[in-house]
Image (spheres, rainbow, N blue to C red):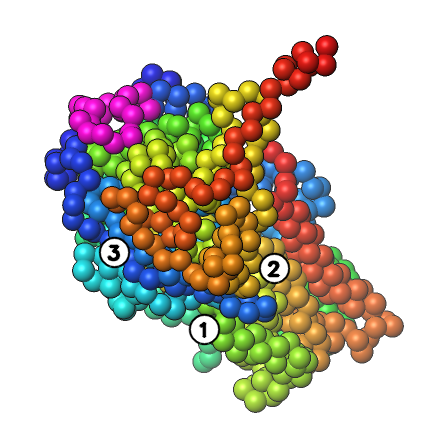
């Protein structure tokens, strides 16, 4: 970064032999350019700046840590709460890993996704050493692409694997599911059994009709519900549903919002007019009734619920994007891109939208909180997929014993509250950090 | 390193050719406003020759930039090009389909803008942005495009060009960004470069560098340049011919030499008189009285008559046409004389020598 490196221009550029008013050329037109401070490699990029600003907001960091905890709980739920032990050693049958064997394909995909996210820096470093080039992607995106591909291939392979729903053993004429807890308790003293169980020794769908509405105890830290299922286990697995619904439905609504807002903002004119009326219609419609109708028509399936929430919550994002694109499209670099001969759609996607992405991140964060809340509302009303334990459903079931077992009511309520709070705190911190007026 | 780029050029040091490359005839662009139709460009005609720099001068709001945007068909709502023709090598750009027009933009005619600070997209590296025109217009390998980008950056005087492709616009200063913009607009070796006030946002030393750079690049690459500016100093040093615009029309057009020697139109004369002079001392800076007319309500007759010291009833009623009063020197004014003398000059230089006053009083 020195001043003396100047490009040498080979052409001699003699003085024009004519009567033009142009003064003779001197070839020193770069002589001052070196005086530009070359902040170059030392300066931080945009996201580093944002992170620095975000870090200063303690509440936002707390929110982020909470979100990360929830994500951790969701991904590692089977390792925290499971009726199968991590490992099981008995003299007559040797060593086995029942928990790992019984992991569902969904569990495995989540774990693979997590591993790929964590391994991103490793991939990046490995790729940096190699000479591979993917178009003109930057190094981070290249690593992201590779890991995404690995994930997709891995997920495909996993989905081919047959599910192991339960671990069974032959008892006389029938195959029965093994109850490791029971076996451990009843094992004869002379039989050597070594086993390690998860902190919560129940799976969320284990029904023990004899243990309905139990008080919190060591075996059931949060008591049991109407069918004797462990409350703790269901809370932990409920995280999964809450986050899953949050991410997918907000993903759907953001996609729709980006598309509609982007088109509306860029084309303006009658396209804008029509799309904005559409947005208004959706905004005017009470979302909850639309949700109830959709779920009533297609049944309370998880996919239906997620799509329904996504379809009813895109209007805010669309408006946000539209406003941003309207602003960005008047900027010189969009005109410059047009003057260069770029097509309309690439301009929207390459120039207008990336500059609107920061506010979208904020709206995504708030949107997830809202989606978690809506899902809880729906499941509280009994409109949730019965296959998946959900916080709202727990709340609804605990309602009947609210006097005898207030804890069963408080805990899922707290979980909903914390999840919504965490995303809101994070969103607020993000909003402040992305503020263009932020200081260096 | 710049040789590869330069070898293909037509004799790069040649004088402006005789051949017309861009012929603008009776261009009319209007903006729909709530108050009525604003005629931002009202019958502008000029031609641009090969390897020539044509300067378009005028005050803010006289339609210089709109003319440029109209040529590239970039006038957006609520503006519209409503008449005239823009012939580029014999094809009327105004009649082309949008997809055909896109192939002209950036490849044959490219443009640089006033604000280097906002003309680059802050979220992309300059490498990516510089390479975009080539990616859009030419099928070249990634390596070739990158090589060309580095070469271009070197050509416009960015030190350590190879290392700076990955940098973001905010890591460059204003002057450097304008160089990047110039590099970007020259990536496809256009035939015409439209420079819309390229130095207005830069400080004076950088201005000089950028103008010198543009001049050098023009000669080396043999392209034609339309230089839009409001700075007469820039015009004098950087153009072969000049068109003076007023209220959406060209009021005077001449070679730079002739215009500076014998300005014919009262407006041009007024512009020169309002330049601070190095010679007259103690003189109050002269201005042209009044301001640019409202484009929605253009004055009748000659649009300059409300501000013109020479205007009479005839000027109010009759609109003058551009006439060639001197060789290559066109003017649209009823009062203009071949030798530049005006019947009456209200703004005769009046040298007020304060020192004399003081002496007499003493």
Element under disc 2: helix
Residue toward you, B189 or A345: B189
Q: Name the residue under label 3.
A: B23
Element under disc 1: strand
- Mark whose residue sits in front, 2 or 1: 2
Left or right, residue A401 beside residue A249: right
At 45% from the left and 73% from the top, the residue drawn is: A170
Magenta region includes residue B201: no
Badge number at residue A363: 2
> Where is A100 relative to A24, above or below?
below
Left or right, residue B72 beside residue A440: left
Stretch in magenta: A6-29
Residue toward you, A83 or A366: A366
Chain of residue at mark 2: A
Q: Main secondary structure of the magenta part?
A: loop
At 42% from the left and 36% from the top, the residue drawn is: B232
**Can residue A224 be seen in the rendering of this structure?**
yes
């Amino acid at each position: 970064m020195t001043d003396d490196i100047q490009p040498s221009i080979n052409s001699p550029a003699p003085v024009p032999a004519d009567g033009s008013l142009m003064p003779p050329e001197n070839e020193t037109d770069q002589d001052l350019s070196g005086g530009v401070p070359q902040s170059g490699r030392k300066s931080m990029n945009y996201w580093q700046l944002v992170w620095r600003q975000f870090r200063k907001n303690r509440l936002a960091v707390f929110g982020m840590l909470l979100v990360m905890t929830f994500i951790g709980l969701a991904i590692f739920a089977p390792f925290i709460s499971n009726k199968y032990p991590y490992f099981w050693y008995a003299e007559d049958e040797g060593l086995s890993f029942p928990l790992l064997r019984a992991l569902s394909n969904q569990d495995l995909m989540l774990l693979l996704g997590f591993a790929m996210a964590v391994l991103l820096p490793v991939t990046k470093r490995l790729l940096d050493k190699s000479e591979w080039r993917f178009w003109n992607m930057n190094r981070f995106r290249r690593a992201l692409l590779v890991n995404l591909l690995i994930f997709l291939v891995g997920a495909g392979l996993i989905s081919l694997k047959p599910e192991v729903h339960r671990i069974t053993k032959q008892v006389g004429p029938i195959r029965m599911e093994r109850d490791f807890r029971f076996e451990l308790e009843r094992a004869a003293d002379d039989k050597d059994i070594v086993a390690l169980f998860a902190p919560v020794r129940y799976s969320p769908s284990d029904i023990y009709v004899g243990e309905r509405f139990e008080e919190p105890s060591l075996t059931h830290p949060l008591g049991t519900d109407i069918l004797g299922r462990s409350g703790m286990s269901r809370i932990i697995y409920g995280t999964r549903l809450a986050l899953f619904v949050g991410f997918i439905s907000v993903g759907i609504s953001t996609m729709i919002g980006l598309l509609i807002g982007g088109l509306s903002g860029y084309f303006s004119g009658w396209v804008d007019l029509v799309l904005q009326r559409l947005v208004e219609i959706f905004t005017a419609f009470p979302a909850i009734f639309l949700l109830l109708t959709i779920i009533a028509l297609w049944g309370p399936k998880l996919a239906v619920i997620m799509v329904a929430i996504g379809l009813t919550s895109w209007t805010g994002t669309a408006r946000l994007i539209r406003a941003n694109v309207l602003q960005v499209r008047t900027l010189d670099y969009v005109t410059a891109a047009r003057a260069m001969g770029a097509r309309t759609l690439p301009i929207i996607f390459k120039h207008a939208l990336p500059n609107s992405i920061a506010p979208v991140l904020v709206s995504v964060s708030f949107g997830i909180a809202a989606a978690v809340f809506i899902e809880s509302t729906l499941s509280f009303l009994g409109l949730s997929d019965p296959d998946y334990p959900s916080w709202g459903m727990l709340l609804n079931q605990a309602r009947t014993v609210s006097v005898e077992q207030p804890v069963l009511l408080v805990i899922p309520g707290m979980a909903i509250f914390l999840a919504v709070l965490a995303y809101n705190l994070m969103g607020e911190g993000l909003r402040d950090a992305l503020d263009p007026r932020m200081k260096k | 390193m710049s040789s590869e780029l330069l070898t293909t050029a037509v004799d790069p040091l040649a004088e402006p050719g005789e051949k017309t490359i861009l012929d603008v005839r009776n261009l009319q662009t209007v903006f729909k406003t709530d108050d009525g139709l604003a005629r931002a460009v009202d019958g502008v005609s000029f031609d641009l020759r090969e390897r020539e720099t044509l300067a378009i001068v005028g005050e803010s709001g006289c339609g210089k930039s709109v003319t440029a945007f109209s040529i590239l068909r970039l006038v957006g709502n609520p503006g519209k090009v409503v008449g005239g023709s823009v012939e580029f090598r014999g094809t009327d750009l105004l009649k082309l389909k949008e997809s055909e027009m896109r192939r002209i933009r950036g490849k044959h005619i490219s443009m640089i803008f006033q604000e280097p600070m906002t003309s680059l997209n802050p979220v992309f590296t300059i490498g990516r942005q510089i390479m975009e025109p080539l990616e859009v217009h030419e099928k070249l390998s990634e390596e070739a495009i990158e090589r060309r980008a580095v070469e271009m950056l070197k050509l416009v005087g960015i030190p350590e060009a190879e290392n700076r492709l990955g940098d973001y616009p905010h890591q460059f200063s204003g002057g450097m960004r304008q160089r990047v913009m110039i590099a970007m607009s020259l990536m496809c070796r256009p035939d015409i470069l439209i420079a819309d006030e390229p130095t207005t946002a830069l400080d004076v030393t950088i201005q000089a560098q950028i103008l010198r750079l543009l001049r050098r690049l023009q000669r080396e690459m043999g392209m034609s340049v339309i230089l839009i500016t409001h700075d007469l100093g820039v015009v004098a040093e950087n153009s072969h011919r000049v068109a003076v615009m007023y209220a959406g029309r060209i009021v005077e057009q001449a070679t730079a030499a002739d215009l500076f020697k014998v300005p014919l139109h009262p407006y041009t004369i007024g512009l020169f008189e309002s330049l601070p002079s190095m010679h007259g001392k103690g003189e109050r800076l002269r201005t042209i009285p009044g301001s640019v007319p409202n484009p929605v309500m253009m004055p009748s007759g000659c649009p300059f008559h409300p501000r013109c010291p020479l205007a009479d009833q005839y000027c109010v009623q009759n609109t003058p046409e551009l006439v060639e009063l001197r060789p290559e020197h066109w003017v649209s004014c009823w009062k203009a004389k071949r030798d530049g003398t005006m019947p009456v000059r209200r703004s005769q230089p009046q040298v007020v020598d304060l020192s004399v006053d003081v002496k007499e009083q003493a």
